[in-house]
Amino acid sequence: MSQKSAKGAGGGAKAAPKGKKAAASGKKVARLEDEREETLQAVILADSFETRFNPFTLETPRCLLPLANTPLIEYTLEFLAMSGVADIYVYCGAHTAEVEKYLQQSKWYPPTSSASPFNSLEIVKTTAKSVGDALRDLDARDLITGDFLLVHGDLVSNLPIDGALAAHRKRRLADKNAIMTMILRDGGLHGHRGKSNGITPVFVVDPTKDRCIHYEEMHALQANKYVNIDPDLLNEHSEIDIRTDLIDCGIDICTPDVLALWAESFDYEVPRRHFLHGVLKDYELNGKTIHTEIVGDHYAARVFNLQSYESVSKDVLARWTYPLVPDSNLLDNQSYKYESGGLCKENGVILARTCKAGKRTVLGRDTSIGDGSRVVDSIIGRRCVIGKNVSIKDAYIWDDVSIGDGTIIERAIIANEAVIGKDCHLEPGSLISYNVKISNGTNVRAGTRLTRGNRKQEDGTKSDAPSDPSLVGQGGFGHAFEDPDEFSDDESSAFHSNMVYSTAHLNISSESISTVSSEISTSSPTTSRSRLSSFASDDADGGNNENFHHDAVEGLLGTLRENGDFDSAKLEFMGLRLSNNATDQQIRRAIAVAFTKRISQLVENDKLEASKAAAQAFGVSGADRFIKNVAIGDEGLEDDQVDFIYRLQKDLVHRNNGAVILAAISQRLYQMEILEEEAFERWWTECEGLEDEDEGMKKVREKTAVFIEWLRQAESESESGEEDSD
């Protein structure tokens, strides 16, 4: 009921008695809350925060790449429109301006399009570099008022959301701790092209409650391929299913509590490997439950890498995604018609009399195909010129591409305005980016990735790169795509950087698999973890060693929560260090995070003053010796002390009352003679000397200024006393 209708309904009524009036008001509020609850919001993670889509996303946002000649985000918006979403917030990891421009010119943008089914479509401008950053930013903006859908801008789905949404709301009314429902697709036990290659998500589910109770990821580089399930879960649940056959659609129905959990754990970066795993492991602490809706009779999939791009394209050609197919003409300027034989083409297509085009093939407007050419199981964009006797199979060719006579193209992607000469051969897995030119008679080897974009240097700068004749032929334009950061973020890049799934480019042998696993696959859970494990972000100067960080932090937290003995915890901690080959920086970081997290919990949950919380944490038996010996080192070097203070500061940036807690910790560690005044003085001086100091880092140390000033005055008085005695 709107405010206007509510006022009209009561306009002629007499004043009710006070008690009845209050009751009526309560009913009115309840009705308004019910109406607000029916208003569904959605958050789109529009561009890549996780895995790259090389080399094409150098120039184009992933959500705007064409899938069956329609930008990916169009499929996502169609799904949200079918789901009855009213308000949408769009976050971009890159190319924000391009995405904003596209959406503002689309039929979906309410301010300029009367045909938009949405009340609002807001492009949120932010500096977020990960999904976690984006959702923490969303929580801070306080835009979400009720249940919302969290999806990615590469979602293709014809799934009706009503059933899953109703089940989610029913669970939430019965238990406020039921905060999220993941929609998963049953992929069957046998091979399915929609399943993720290399990375196998493992969902452990209680089928009696449709509740996910454990999550892990397994991958081909993993030495020991087994799942670590806490024995307590087996005792608590009478029935469990361990599912490796589920396809993660990336559709989550969430309550605002989900955003609160993201905000509380700044080290979460991605939805599954970090957030889901961490929340499930922290169940005893937060009591929040996450549920599943497993579907088998509709289509839903994400185009999150090159291999899924191919698999979803084939699903579109097979019409599994109906009505999200080319002849539905999702864009106003499209004119596709589906013809017998499996050919779908737009107006203006020119086909030579002896060419063969059909059998799950899409042809865009004004494309021409010459005599004797054959196109099968492929998608061709607009204004493409395909010569005579060309063979194209399982290929994805975008707009304005020219292909010379006699060329063979197998299972390749060719971007806009590329030119392929005569008598060329593009072997399976070839990726030809924008404006690349391949000279006549050139053989492009399997898995080759060519671009004309600037080459990224190790220092982060970009520079022009000369064409490589050995790859594009004499007179061609383009060079091999190279990214020095390609395998530095997570293990998924090792499997997903190519179109054709293969581990051959990783040079893996049975003798070296353990070594490769430790170098590349640092973020997948392979070792035993404590029950309350959570994930953390990579340490910029400490290197990637998430397994160690997660297990070390939670092991120390367990000791702090149980008021245990650090002399015993030290043995387990040092074992973790040796098994993970952790650096000194990683050790200090883990210890700092464990103590700041525990002190923060005592301040927030137990309502202790920061000074008392610090005293309690550092007062646990053996804590002082542990920090001195392990975090700082027996030599007590000033460099190590300063680094430890910095680790404390960096972690507290993201915690409530961080500034107050840092001041309390600093004073406590000084009183315990763990950190010396010279270390504090040097840390403070170095921070003040930074011209571009991060605003969060600066703010979190503000309260410590009083302590630093006290140290300086004490030193001054000491020096003055020495002079007087002399």
Image (spheres, grey):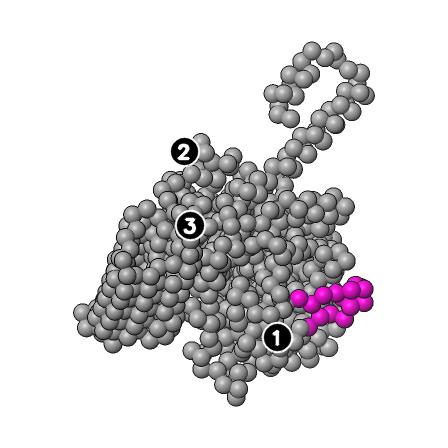
Q: Nearer the viewer, mark 1 or mark 3?
A: 3
Discs 3, 2 touching: Cβ within 8 Å: no
Q: Is residue 123 visible to us here?
A: yes
Decide whether residue 711 is among the magenta residues: no
- Image quarter where the N terminus lies is top right
Q: Position of residue 283 (x, y in %)?
A: 72, 59
Number of marks: 3
Q: Callout 3 environment at 10 Å: few (<14), some (14 to 19), or many (20+)?
A: some
Identity of the residue drawn at 45% across and 82% down:
507
Q: Position of residue 659 (x, y in %)?
A: 58, 53
Residue at image mark 1: 526
- Marking on residue 112: 2
Q: SS at mark 3?
A: strand
What amino acid is labelled 1 in the image?
A: Thr
What amino acid is labelled 2 in the image?
A: Thr
- Marking on residue 33: none
What amino acid is labelled 3 in the image?
A: Tyr
In the displayed structure, 369 sits above or below 443; it is above
Residue at image mark 3: 338
Lateral position of residue 244 relative to residue 516, left or right: right
**Magenta part of the chain:** 228-243
Q: Position of residue 621 (x, y in %)?
A: 74, 71
Q: SS at mark 1?
A: loop
Furthest-bottom residue in this view: 511
Lateral position of residue 327 relative to residue 513, left or right: left
